[in-house]
Image (cartoon, rainbow, N blue to C red):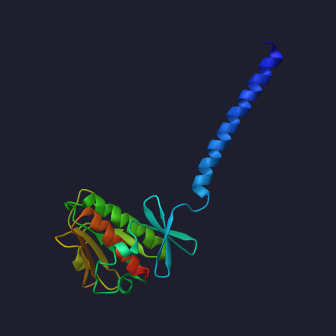
Amino acid sequence: MGREEKKKLFSKQNMVAMFIVFIMVSSVIGYMFGKEGGEKFKYGDHSFLLRNKEFILKTDNEELSFDFFPADVDDIETDFDVSDVIKGVAEIDFTSDPDDKHAEIIALAQYRFQQVLERVSNTYVLNGMTSKNEFNLPVITCEDATESIPVLYFKKANVTSIILENNCIIAQAKSEVDILRVKDRLLYGLLGII
């Protein structure tokens, strides 16, 4: 093979390799930013998209993510309107027991709640625990709850429910799955969806 033939072969190999790389990169970009994939669901006047095992609600150029569809959590009763307690407050304090059996999933629920809250309001979130803890988080209990700074207390319990006691929202759940259900029920109540 002469030098000219090697240049042509090398050039063709480069072009083929660059073409394959282009196809792969385009596919990834198309997947990430392309048309909305996923199954669509409707709840009342709200449309949701099931994408990557999350229910996505689009509002004013925002995408809010939930673990459960509203119909899967609307059986969790509350005797108060969540938006009356949370909407419009400058701060809300989150708390949980440091030795709660479901501490990890509670932390995840608090984080996801905070993500949605930050997108729909200017509410500051202070994370704490009900007693002294290894994370040096402030001690926050229901006794600290006020009308201007309510407390959201996630905890494991024998029943799954949401109750309000003196500006303290107690989100209690029997299982790890129910902790995420309670989180979504609170958020849907805050947004006026349920």
Say left or right for 60 vs 2.
left
Quadrant placement of the C terminus: bottom left
Q: Position of residue 173 (x, y in %)?
A: 23, 69
Vertical placement of residue 154 versus 75, above or below: above
Query: Where residue 128 appears, x then y in whole percent?
Result: 29, 67
What residue appears at the point 81 percent right and 13 percent down from the top-left corner? 2
Query: Viewer-proximal residue, 20 or 161?
Result: 20
The N terminus lies in quadrant: top right
Q: Is residue 3 above or below residue 120?
A: above
Query: Seen from this angle, which residue lies furthest right?
Result: 4
Q: Considering depth in this image, is 138 or 15 the residue closer to the camera?
A: 15
**Residue that appears at 35% across and 70% down:** 126
> Which residue is rendered at x = 65% and y = 39% of the image?
21
Residue 91 percent location from the top left of the image: 39, 77
Q: Number of marks in the image?
A: 0
The answer to which image quadrant residue 180 occupies is bottom left
To which quarter of the image does residue 33 belong?
bottom right
